[in-house]
Image: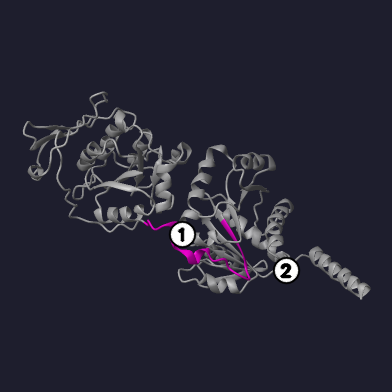
C-alpha cells in the first residue's frame, strides 16, 4: 500500500512512517503544506493508494486556512485519476465541525478524532484496507452552526485554486480566493524536469479546480513552527501487561458503545445480583464521571462531596475513581470485581476491558445506532467473546440484533428504575452469562440450590466410594 502523509508536523509524520514500515505500508512522500500536497499528488499519480490527511496541513502561522484545505481536497476528489484514492482524516476537531461535515459530503468516511476511535497503527492501516462505513461516519455529517465558517454547506464551492507554470518553469502563479501569489522555486535548477500531469484535462470541475504545475519541485522545507502532537500511534499489542489474565478473581467489564445507555445501572445491577448470592464483590468506577461521589453523598444525605475513596452499600463495596487507584490491589481482595467503564473511549482503563473474564457491552437495538457498535469494535482488541446487553429491550429486538452480529450473544435487560432491585428476567440473564464462563473455568457462583447440588454430589460420591471398597 502506497501512502502520502500530509501534516504540518513533520516529526510526527516521520514517526508514523517508521511505524507503518512494519505493516508493509510504503510512504511515498511526507508533505507539510497544502501546496505540496498538490505537487506530490501530481508526481505520484499512478502509485498513490491513500492519503493520511491531518487537519493542520494548511496551517500558516496561526491561521489554519481550513476552507483552503477543504477546497483542495474537493478538487482532488473530483479528479478522475484519484477517484479510488482513499482519504483518512486525522482531525484535531470533534464531530460537529464544518470541515468534517464538508469532508463527509465529499464521500470521506475515515475519521480519527481526539475522542473517537483509538488511533493506533493497526486501526490506521485498517482504515485504508477496509474503509469505515457510511453509518459510522454519519455523526460527522451535521455541522455545528455556532462554529464560524465561510459559507452555508449547501451552497456550491467558491474557492478557486489554480497553479499555472510560466514558460521558463521558474515561477508559478497561484490564485487563492482571488489573491495573486508569486512563488519562486529556488531549487528547480538542480532538479531534473518531470513530465507534467494535467489531472483536469479530461474532466471539468465546479468553481473549485486545480491545474498541476508543469515543473518538478525541490526538497520540501519542514515547517519551522513544529508542534508537539500527542496522538497515540503505537501498535495495539504494545501493552502486553494489560493482556495478562488476572488469576483468582473474576473480572466483569461493563462498557458502553455510547454515552447514557445505562452502563452504570447495569454494572450496579450485576454487582448486586452476585453479592446477593453471598459473594464478595467490588464495583469499581472505571471512568472519570464521578458518579460514585454523587451517589455516596446522596446515600449519606450530604450536600457536599465525601472524600472517602470507597463505601459499602446494599451488600457490596463501591470503589470511586481516583487517579492513583491501584486495580491490582483491588483484584486481590475480592472474588468478583465489576468494572463500570462507561463509554469505552473515555475510560482510562479500556485495556482492562480487553482482559476481563466476562465482557459486557451495553448497546442499543435501534438499527440507526448500529454504527455505535461498529465503532466500539474498533476500540477494543478482543471481539470474539463479547456479550451484548440491551437495556429496556425485549427478546425480539435482541434476536434481530443477534442476527446481524452473529459472533456475539445478545441479551435484553428488563427496564427498571432502581438498579439495586434486580428484576427476575435480568437476574436470569446475569446467571446465564455467569454460568457460561464459570462452568468453563471451574468456578462456582454461590447460590443455595447450587450448594445443595454440590452437597448431594459429594454424598453420592462418598456412598459410591464406600460401596466399591
Sooner in the amino-acid sequence: mark 1 or mark 2: 1
Horizontal side of residue 437 vs 112, given as left or right: right
Magenta stretch, residue numbers: 232-254
**Element under disc 2:** loop
Q: Residue furthest left?
A: 168
Q: In the figure, 231 relative to 321: above or below?
A: above
Q: Residue at x 37, y 33 (%)?
A: 105
Judge by depth and name the residue closer to the eye, 210 or 257: 210
Q: Residue at x 49, y 46 (%)?
A: 375
Quarter of the picture holding the N terminus: top left
Q: Identify the mark at residue 237; answer none if there is no mark.
A: 1
Disc 2 packing (10 Å; few <14; some 14–19; many ≥20): some
How is the structure coloured here?
Answer: one colour
Measuring from the top left, give residue 253's x and y in whole percent: 58, 59
Q: Identify the mark at residue 278; answer none if there is no mark.
A: 2
Q: In the figure, 48 relative to 8: above or below?
A: above
Q: Residue at x 19, y 30 (%)?
A: 211
Residue 21 counted in the magenta span: no
Measuring from the top left, give residue 314's x and y in whole percent: 67, 66
Q: Is residue 159 visible?
A: yes
Q: Is residue 119 visible?
A: no
Quarter of the picture holding the C terminus: bottom right
Q: Residue at x 37, y 56 (%)?
A: 233
State the CA–CA distance, disc 1 to disc 2. 37 Å
Measuring from the top left, give residue 123's x and y in whole percent: 43, 50
Q: In the figure, 203 relative to 308: above or below?
A: above
Judge by depth and name the residue closer to the eye, 419 or 201: 201
Horizontal side of residue 187 vs 27, given as left or right: left
Residue 233 counted in the magenta span: yes
**Element under disc 1:** helix
Amino acid at each position: 500500500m502506497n501512502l502520502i502523509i500530509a501534516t504540518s508536523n513533520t516529526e510526527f509524520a516521520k514517526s508514523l512512517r517508521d511505524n507503518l514500515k512494519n505493516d508493509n505500508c510504503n510512504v511515498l512522500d511526507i508533505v507539510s503544506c497544502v501546496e505540496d500536497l498538490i505537487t506530490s499528488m501530481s508526481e505520484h499519480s499512478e502509485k498513490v493508494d491513500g492519503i493520511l490527511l491531518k487537519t493542520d496541513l494548511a496551517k500558516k502561522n496561526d491561521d489554519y486556512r481550513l476552507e483552503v484545505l477543504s477546497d483542495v481536497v474537493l478538487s482532488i476528489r473530483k479528479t478522475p485519476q484519484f477517484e479510488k484514492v482513499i482519504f483518512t482524516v486525522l482531525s484535531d476537531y470533534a464531530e460537529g465541525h464544518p470541515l468534517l461535515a464538508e469532508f463527509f459530503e465529499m464521500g470521506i468516511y475515515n475519521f480519527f478524532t481526539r475522542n473517537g476511535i483509538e488511533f493506533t497503527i493497526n486501526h490506521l492501516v485498517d482504515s485504508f484496507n477496509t474503509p469505515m462505513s457510511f453509518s459510522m461516519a454519519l455523526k460527522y455529517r451535521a455541522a455545528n452552526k455556532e462554529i464560524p465558517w465561510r459559507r452555508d454547506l449547501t451552497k456550491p464551492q467558491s474557492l478557486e485554486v489554480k497553479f499555472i507554470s510560466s514558460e521558463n518553469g521558474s515561477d508559478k502563479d497561484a490564485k487563492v480566493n482571488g489573491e495573486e501569489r508569486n512563488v519562486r522555486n529556488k531549487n528547480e535548477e538542480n532538479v531534473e524536469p518531470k513530465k507534467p500531469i494535467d489531472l483536469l484535462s479530461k474532466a471539468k470541475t465546479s468553481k473549485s479546480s486545480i491545474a498541476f504545475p508543469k515543473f518538478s519541485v525541490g526538497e520540501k522545507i519542514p515547517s519551522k513552527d513544529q508542534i508537539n502532537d500527542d496522538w497515540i500511534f503505537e501498535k495495539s499489542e504494545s501493552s502486553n501487561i494489560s493482556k495478562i489474565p488476572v488469576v483468582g478473581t473474576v473480572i466483569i467489564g461493563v462498557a458502553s458503545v455510547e454515552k447514557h445507555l445505562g452502563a452504570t445501572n447495569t454494572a450496579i445491577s450485576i454487582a448486586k445480583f452476585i453479592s446477593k448470592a453471598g459473594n464478595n464483590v467490588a464495583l469499581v468506577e472505571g471512568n472519570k464521571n464521578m458518579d460514585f461521589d454523587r451517589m455516596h453523598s446522596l446515600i449519606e444525605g450530604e450536600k457536599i462531596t465525601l472524600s472517602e475513596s470507597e463505601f459499602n452499600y446494599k451488600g457490596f463495596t463501591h470503589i470511586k475513581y481516583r487517579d492513583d487507584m491501584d486495580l491490582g490491589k483491588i483484584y486481590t481482595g475480592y472474588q468478583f470485581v465489576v468494572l463500570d467503564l462507561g463509554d469505552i473511549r473515555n475510560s482510562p482503563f479500556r485495556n482492562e476491558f480487553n482482559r476481563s473474564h466476562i465482557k459486557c457491552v451495553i448497546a442499543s437495538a435501534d438499527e440507526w445506532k448500529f454504527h455505535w457498535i461498529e465503532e466500539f469494535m474498533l476500540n477494543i482488541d478482543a471481539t470474539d467473546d463479547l456479550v451484548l446487553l440491551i437495556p429496556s429491550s425485549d427478546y425480539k429486538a435482541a434476536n434481530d440484533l443477534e442476527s446481524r452480529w452473529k459472533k456475539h450473544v445478545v441479551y435484553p435487560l428488563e427496564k427498571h428504575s432502581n438498579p439495586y432491585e434486580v428484576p427476575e428476567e435480568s437476574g436470569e440473564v446475569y446467571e446465564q452469562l455467569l454460568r457460561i464462563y464459570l462452568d468453563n473455568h471451574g468456578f462456582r457462583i454461590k447460590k443455595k440450590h447450587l450448594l445443595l447440588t454440590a452437597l448431594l454430589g459429594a454424598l453420592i460420591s462418598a456412598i459410591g466410594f464406600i460401596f466399591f471398597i
